[in-house]
Image (spheres, grey):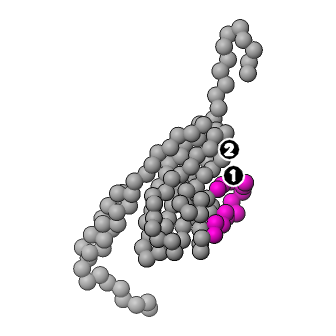
């Protein structure tokens, strides 16, 4: 038989969940729209802490894939085939640039700055495909 785990104050769990939800809900999300083939740079908020680690993650609806990090002032692009050769991270600012965008790059990007505490920024990118227009009596482009 396992250990007897009981909450001494059952309401405290609910309060903790509500507080966590409020903190997560307060995170600002920057919405960005871009055209396929273009380049986008996610601008990070300035930080004076030179010893922090920076981690960039990505996902279609939740940022679950690690794509880049800065550790000890060195940039590491992590193996994620979707972005091969198209990512750049500025090791001074932490800004992430994605070039030659495709519609598959649509999703949520998260920046985490990690040192004595963790600060986060979220970016919601929507990439639109190039649309070809056909005018009557004109060749199709």
Residue shown at the point (35%, 57%) measured from the top left? 26
Residue drawn at (60%, 37%), measured in percent from left and top? Answer: 35
| Quadrant in the picture for residue 1 | bottom left
Residue 2 percent coordinates (x, y): 43, 90
Foreground residue, 110 or 95? 95
Q: Quadrant of residue 132?
A: top right
Q: Which residues are magenta?
A: 74-88
| Marks 1 and 2 close (CB-CB < 8 Å) | yes
Q: x%, y% of residue 119?
A: 43, 66
Q: Residues within 10 Å of mark 2 (few under 14, many from 20)?
A: some
Indicate the quadrant where residue 38 lies.
Answer: top right
Q: Is residue 55 above or below residue 103?
A: below
Q: Residue at x 60, y 52 (%)?
A: 97
Q: Is residue 43 above or below residue 116?
A: above
Residue 29 at x, y percent in the picture: 43, 51
From this viewpoint, is residue 12 visible? yes
Residue 61, x across and y down, in percent? 52, 52
Of callouts 1 and 2, the N-terminal one? 1
Closer to the camera in the image, 2 or 105: 105
Mark 1 = which residue? 86
- 83 magenta-colored: yes
Looking at the image, the residue that sits furthest to the top is 137
To which residue does mark 2 refer? 100
Q: Is 84 on the left or on the right of 103, as rendered? A: right
Q: CA distance from mark 1 to mark 2?
A: 7 Å
Residue at 26% x, 75% y is 12
Q: Mark 1 Cα within 10 Å, few/some/many (few <14, many 20+)? A: few
The mark found on residue 47 in the picture is none
SS of the residue under disc 1: loop
Regarding residue 58, the answer to whether it shows in the image is no
């Amino acid at each position: 038989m396992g250990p007897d785990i009981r909450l001494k104050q059952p309401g405290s769990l609910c309060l903790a969940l509500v507080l966590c939800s409020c903190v997560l809900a307060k995170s600002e999300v920057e919405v960005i729209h871009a055209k396929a083939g273009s380049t986008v740079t996610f601008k990070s908020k300035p930080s004076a802490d030179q010893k922090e680690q920076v981690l960039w993650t990505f996902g279609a609806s939740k940022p679950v894939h690690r794509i880049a990090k800065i550790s000890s002032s060195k940039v590491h692009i992590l193996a994620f085939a979707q972005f091969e050769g198209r990512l750049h991270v500025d090791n001074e600012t932490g800004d992430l640039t994605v070039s030659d965008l495709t519609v598959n790059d649509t999703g949520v990007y998260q920046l985490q700055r990690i040192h004595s505490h963790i600060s986060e920024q979220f970016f919601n990118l929507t990439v639109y495909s190039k649309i070809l227009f056909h005018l009557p009596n004109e060749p199709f482009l």
